[in-house]
Amino acid sequence: MTLPVTQTVDVIWWITAVEIPAVASLFWLHWRMRSELLGRVEQLRAREESDASDLRDALAAFKLDVARNYVSIPYLKDVEKRLTGHLLRIEAKLDMPPIPSKKDLSL
C-alpha cells in the first residue's frame, strides 16, 4: 500500500514547517535558561563568599571587643593565679613516688 503523494508532502511540510522550528526553539530556550541559571549560581556563590567573609570579620571584631571590654585585668590575674596553683599541685602529685599497693607488697 502506497501513500498518496499529498499525504507524504503534508508530513514533510509539517516536519519542515512546524517540528524543526519547534525543536530548535526548545533547544534555544533550554540553552538560554541553563546559561542564566549558571550565571545566577555564580552570583549567589560570590555573594555568599562575600557575606561569609563579612561575618567572619564582624565576629573577630566582636571577640576583640569582648576581650577588651568585658574581662577585667584583676579577674584575669585571679584566674591565672588559680590555674597556676592547680598546675603546681598537679605537678607536685606527679613528682611524688607512687605508693605501693597491697598487691605490690604481696609479690
Image (cartoon, rainbow, N blue to C red):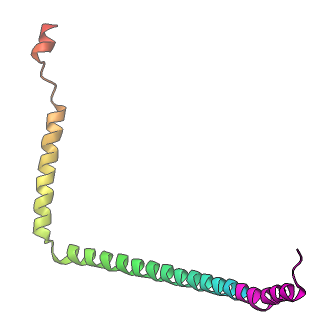
Tell me where residue 84 appears, x and y as whole percent.
15, 51
Q: For this rendering, which residue is in front, 40 or 81?
A: 40
Quarter holding the N terminus is: bottom right
Tell me where residue 40 appears, x and y as whole percent.
53, 84
Residue 12 on the magenta segment: yes
11 with respect to 57 (left or right): right
Quarter holding the C terminus is: top left
14 with respect to 86 (left or right): right
> Relative to 77, does residue 103 appear above or below in the rendering?
above
> Relative to 64, does residue 80 appear above or below in the rendering?
above
Q: Residue at x 60, y 85 (%)?
A: 33
> Relative to 85, does residue 19 appear above or below in the rendering?
below
> Relative to 32, does residue 62 appear above or below in the rendering?
above
Q: For this rendering, which residue is in front, 46 or 100?
A: 46
Residue 78: quarter of image:
bottom left
Residue 35: quarter of image:
bottom right
45 with respect to 61 (left or right): right
Tell me where residue 93 appears, x and y as whole percent.
14, 35
Q: Residue at x 71, y 88 (%)?
A: 22
Q: For this rendering, which residue is in front, 47 or 106?
A: 47
Report the residue that reaches farthest toward the front.
Answer: 1
Q: Residue at x 83, y 86 (%)?
A: 7
Range of magenta residues: 1-23
Report the residue that reaches farthest toward the top.
Answer: 107
Tell me where residue 13 appears, x and y as whole percent.
82, 90
Q: Main secondary structure of the magenta part?
A: helix
7 with respect to 37 (left or right): right
**Count of picture labels:** 0
